[in-house]
Image: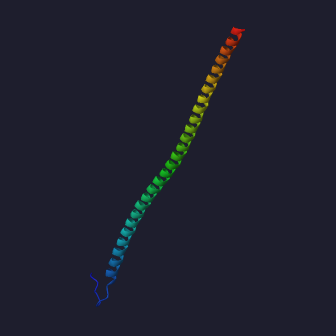
Amino acid sequence: MAEESHGNSPSLWDIQRIIERNYTDSKEDILDLKAQLTRQQEIVEMRFTQYLLKAVYDAEKKSWEERIDKLEREASATRARATQAVYTALASATAAILAGIVLAIILGRG
């Protein structure tokens, strides 16, 4: 049984098919939109993770550079102290030898 169309107005059957088609189209659009939003969210999360990893890397790199600088300064200061200790020991040994020579000269003449 086909329903009759009255002039230009759609039949109830036509309206029902239009509603069902719009519902199906809208449902597919919504599912597609949800998929797009999920992909965008994943992209944003990946970028945020990369940003955090870079920030952590930069902070650790700065910390290591500061530690290395500190160790280099300490090593330089230690080398300077060692050099000074060697010069002091040489000066003491030289003074003792000179004192021995002077005493030998003085006591040898006496």
Image-quadrant location for residue 6: bottom left
Image position of 54 with respect to 79: above or below = below
Q: Between residue 72 and residue 35, name the one nearer to us.
A: 72
Q: Between residue 24 and residue 88, name the one nearer to us.
A: 88
Q: Please state, as top left, top right, bottom left or bottom right, where the N terminus lies in the image.
A: bottom left
Residue drawn 71% across and 10% down?
107
Q: Between residue 52 and residue 40, name the one nearer to us.
A: 52
Q: Please state, as top left, top right, bottom left or bottom right, where the C terminus lies in the image.
A: top right
Q: Is residue 67 left or right of residue 11?
A: right
Give the residue at the far left of this rendering. Answer: 2
Which x, y percent locates residue 78? 59, 32
Residue drawn 65% across and 14% down?
101
Residue drawn 64% across and 26% down?
88
Give the residue at the far bottom of this rendering. Answer: 7
Image position of 32 with respect to 61: above or below = below
Q: Is residue 58 left or right of residue 43?
A: right
Q: Is residue 27 left or right of residue 65?
A: left
Which x, y percent locates residue 50? 45, 53
Which x, y percent locates residue 44? 45, 59
Q: Between residue 91 and residue 20, name the one nearer to us.
A: 91
Give the residue at the far right of this rendering. Answer: 110
Image-quadrant location for residue 25: bottom left
